[in-house]
Image (cartoon, grey):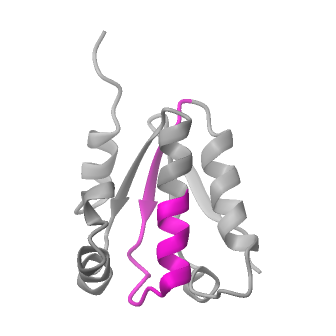
């Protein structure tokens, strides 16, 4: 398994979901756990998840997204999904769980949505 693609930008952890096979593989939990760990350990709890490479999502992939969102909410963090392809958005909509997530068209919009509010 290749390492998780992630970087910090303006106090936001940006994770690229570029190992699509691992996201949709119900037999392997390693990738999912690595995503969860990275998000939970990032100070400030602001995470932008790039779904651009994901052109198909299985129930395992949906489980990863819901699990990540639950963990972020429990930690009082925030998650924004961006570059979500139409198929992925449609699956989430058909499952009636798209409302659980905040979507952005691209990375700049996601970073803007996650910018700290002025004090």
Residue 93 vs 119, above or below: the answer is below
Q: How many marks?
A: 0
Q: Write the residue at 36% across / 60% down.
A: 81
Residue 39 in the magenta stretch? The answer is no
Residue 1 seen in the figure: yes
Please tell me in which quadrant of the rendered image residue 103 appears.
Answer: bottom left
Rendering coords of residue 63 (x, y %) = 53, 72
* Left or right, residue 39 beside residue 108: right
Quadrant where the N terminus is found in the figure = bottom right
Which range of residues does the magenta coloring cover?
44-67
Give the x, y percent position of residue 65: 48, 65
- Depth order, front residue of 77/105: 77
Please identify the quarter of the rendering in which residue 41 is found.
top right
User: Is 82 left, or right, of 6 in this rendering?
Assistant: left
Across and down, in percent, residue 88 comes to: 33, 80
Q: Residue furthest top?
A: 119
Q: Residue furthest front?
A: 96
Residue at image position (32%, 56%) is 100
Task: Tell me what residue is drawn at x 55 percent, y 69 percent.
Answer: 64
Q: Is residue 54 magenta?
A: yes
Q: Which of 118/10 is in front? A: 118
39 vs 93, nearest the viewer: 93
Q: Is residue 114 left or right of residue 30?
A: left
- Image quadrant where residue 104 sits: bottom left
Task: Please tell me which residue is depicted at 64% across the width and 43% down the height of the picture.
Answer: 40
Q: Position of residue 26 (x, y in %)?
A: 65, 86
In the picture, the quarter occupied by the C terminus is top left
Is 15 placed above or below 12 here? below
- The answer to whether residue 57 is above or below residue 45 is below
């Amino acid at each position: 398994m290749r390492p998780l693609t992630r970087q910090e930008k303006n106090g936001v952890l940006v994770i690229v979901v570029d190992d699509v096979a691992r996201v949709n593989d119900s037999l392997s939990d390693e990738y999912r756990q690595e995503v969860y760990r990275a998000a939970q350990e990032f100070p400030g709890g602001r995470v932008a998840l790039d779904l651009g490479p994901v052109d198909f999502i299985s129930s395992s992939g949906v489980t990863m997204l819901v699990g990540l969102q639950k963990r972020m909410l429990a930690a009082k963090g925030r998650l924004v999904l961006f570059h979500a392809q139409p198929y992925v958005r449609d699956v989430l909509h058909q499952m009636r769980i798209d409302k659980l997530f905040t979507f952005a068209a691209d990375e700049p919009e996601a970073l803007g949505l996650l910018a700290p509010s002025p004090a």
